[in-house]
Image: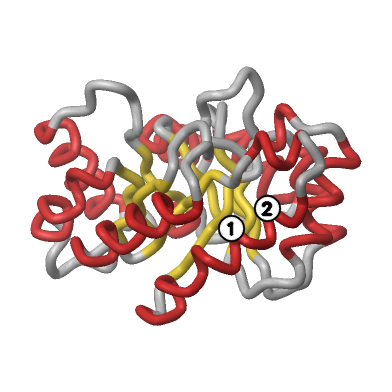
Amino acid sequence: MSFNLSNSIEHTLLKPGTTMSEVDKLCLEASLENFYAVCIPSKYIVNAKKMLDGSNVKVVTVISFPLGNLSPDLKVQEIEEALAKGADELDMVIDLSALKSGNYKQLEYEIETCLKPVYSEGKVLKIIVESGILTRNELLECCRLYSNYDIDFMKTSSGFASRGATVEAVRIMKANLPFRVGIKASGGIRSLQSAQDLIDAGAVRLGTSASMQIMRESRNKQ
């Protein structure tokens, strides 16, 4: 593969009931494989930072996950707590109900409110739009709306909806977002082929819990 596969992966563990020992294992794997980051629940940020000290692996956590239905003020509280713990990047689920209702003013207020603490700390914000449950027009509207803000990434999915990342959704994002906005594909990426397809479509980051399997396939292919 021509791109740096391992350094495009965010090694992810967000299942209900995640334990500290599982996060420790995740961090060890990420450091050995030189993954870009681990993506974990906020409660484990401090421990993960200690585990990854001396490595290049970043710590990513999620905000208003997986439903996105917290108020902007509560999302800001989550963001500030995660930043205080040392999170490097934040993946925030947008207000999907507002999107489905066509309440774009609410989405604008939300992103304006939530970007402020991220800006002040110089950190990275990815917005999760749950593309698998959106119509094409809704996804295009997301691209239009968020192109007006200095978000760092648009992320396809939480991994908890009925459908995760698709090549079609990534292609739509790639064609309709400014070049400065990266695309993170996540949700259902379980093989080297699916990773390759999504990268080819325009994703520059992959969120997956099948990272080790994908790396094994990559080495076997080589």
Three-letter amino acid code at the position of disc 1: Glu
Q: Which label number is shown at residue 37? A: none
Three-letter amino acid code at the position of disc 2: Gln
Residue 41 locus on image (x, y percent): 28, 41
Q: Residue at x 20, y 52 (%)?
A: 45
18 relative position to 75: left or right: left
Q: Residue at x 35, y 33 (%)?
A: 14
> Which of the 4 quarters of the picture holds residue 89?
bottom left
Q: Residues within 10 Å of mark 1 (few under 14, many from 20)?
A: some
Residue 212, above or below 82: above
65 relative position to 47: left or right: right
Residue 94, above or below 16: below
Residue 30, above or below 174: above
- Nearer to the camera, 81 or 45: 81
Q: Residue furthest right?
A: 137
Residue 30 locus on image (x, y percent): 28, 49
Residue at which label 2 appears: 106
Q: Residue furthest top?
A: 162
Q: Mark 2 and mark 1: span between their CA atoms?
A: 6 Å
Q: Are marks 2 and 1 in contact (CB under 8 Å)?
A: yes
The number of numbered badges drawn on the structure is 2
Residue 36 locus on image (x, y percent): 39, 59
Residue at which label 1 appears: 110
- Nearer to the camera, 115 or 24: 115
Q: Residue at x 33, y 56 (%)?
A: 77
Q: In the structure shown, which secondary structural element does the residue marked by tag 1 occupy?
A: helix
Its colouring scheme is secondary structure
3 relative position to 70: left or right: right
Q: Residue at x 59, y 68 (%)?
A: 112
